[in-house]
Amino acid sequence: MFRGFTVTEKYHRLGKNPDSLKWESANITELKTWGIESSVNINFDELLKIQIPVKSVDIAYLYMNSSKASGEYVSYYVMDYLKHKFTLGINSTIYKKTGFSMVFGYSDRNGSYTDYSDGKEKTTSDLQPLI
């Protein structure tokens, strides 16, 4: 039996003189973004040639920076991006072919947010790092 769904949408624009309502969308903000990313995997089985509980370790780091310039225009372009990210992964064997993996991470975002928890604007706060 076939199961599915159908979506039907209708749009209608009301206006006497559409030419007076014309506007143009444009990218007026110039973004400059750059970053580095590095990762390494250390496989202890290959490196040491002996059996140990920790099979491998993965380490990764990312750094990103971004800036914007919009000239005489007011830009509301959101500058919320991941600035620092560090991860550490550990892969281990418990018994024979049974194992587990753990991943630890640290993330630091650039940007801020506005607290609306009670329905009214309270304060603007910087984003805090996440561990």
Image (tube, rainbow, N blue to C red):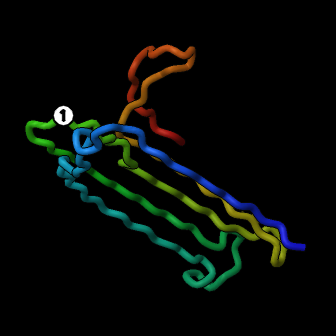
Measuring 49% from the left and 63% from the top, which residue is drawn there? 59
Decide: is 105 above or below 46. Answer: above
In the picture as drawn, the residue positioned furthest to the front comes out as: 16
Vertical placement of residue 57 versus 130, above or below:
below
Classed neighbour count for the residue bearing mark 1: other residues with Cα under 10 Å, few (<14), some (14–19), many (≥20): few
Is residue 122 toward the left or the right of residue 76 in the image?
A: right
Residue on which the image places disc 1:
74
The type of residue carrying mark 1 is Val
> Residue 76's image quarter?
top left
Closer to us: 37 or 12: 12
Q: Quadrant of the N terminus?
A: bottom right
Q: Tell me which corner region of the image, top left, top right, bottom left or bottom right, holds residue 64.
A: bottom left
| Residue 67 rendering spot, x and y as whole percentages | 21, 46
Residue 22 at what x, y percent from top left?
25, 44
Residue at the extreme left of the image, as rendered: 72
Q: Is residue 49 above or below residue 74?
A: below
SS of the residue at dot 1?
loop
Q: Residue at x 66, y 82 (%)?
A: 50
**Split into 4 quadrants, where in the image is the C terminus?**
top right
Where does the image place residue 94, in percent across and percent down from the top left? Answer: 80, 67
Q: Position of residue 58 (x, y in %)?
A: 53, 67
- Could you tell me which residue is drawn at 51 percent across and 56 percent down? 87
98 sits to left or right of 71: right
* Closer to us: 123 or 118: 118
Instruction: Please give left or right for residue 20 compared with residue 8 in the image.
Output: left
